[in-house]
Amino acid sequence: MNKTAMLPGTFDPPTLGHINIIRRSASLFDKLYVVVAHNVNKKCLFTPQERVDMLKETLKDLENVSVFSDTGLSVDFAKKHDVSVMIRGVRSEQDFAYEFELAMTNKMLYSDLETLFIPTDQSYIILRSSQIKEMIQFGADISKMVPEEVLKKLVEKYKKN
């Protein structure tokens, strides 16, 4: 049976926590779509294309992973691409509560879609993209928090600002 999953997120910027969840998910499915979402409620530092490019570069060794950008609902992407499982990474009880409600809503919109919650690896439990963006503005060493390609892009971005 060919199982296809998706992992949607803002990924602004992609962190090692994101990459860990993606790599673990890729080992469970025949095909994994990483979907860079356009969240109108978030002010992003990087354009959707920049985030896609960073993820593609970081994940280029994973043959069963494809990276996309999408402006619609995740469930609509799932329907269009025949995705049966949506992966959601969770770091805490608060994450789980939010993701659980979202999963129930998604199930109402697309009954064939299952949600799989994957707890973050313990070493990445405190990583949040918003904190990383704040720390780099103050010159903190974030090299253990983001992939090398992302670190370069963050340095470039903040040099311009």
Image: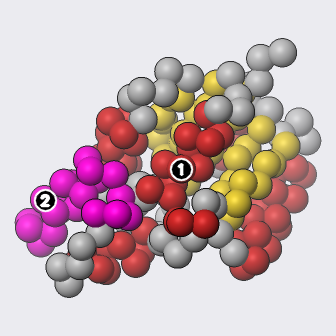
Does the image show residue 70? no
Percent x, y of residue 134: 31, 80
Quadrant hosting residue 110: top right
**Which image quadrant: the N terminus?**
top right
Give the number of the mark in front: 2 or 1: 1
Kind of residue indicated by mark 2 = Glu
Distance CA(mark 2)–CA(mark 1) = 24 Å
Q: Is most of the magenta stretch helix, strand or loop?
A: helix
Q: Which residue is mark 1?
A: 20
Percent x, y of residue 109: 84, 48
- Magenta residues, as a range? 143-161
Q: Nearer the viewer, residue 20 or 102?
A: 20
Kind of residue indicated by mark 1 = Asn
Percent x, y of residue 51: 36, 48
Q: Earlier in the sequence, mark 2 or mark 1?
A: 1
Q: Is residue 3 above or below residue 160?
A: above
Q: Which residue is mark 2?
A: 156
Check the image and name the residue furthest to the top: 1
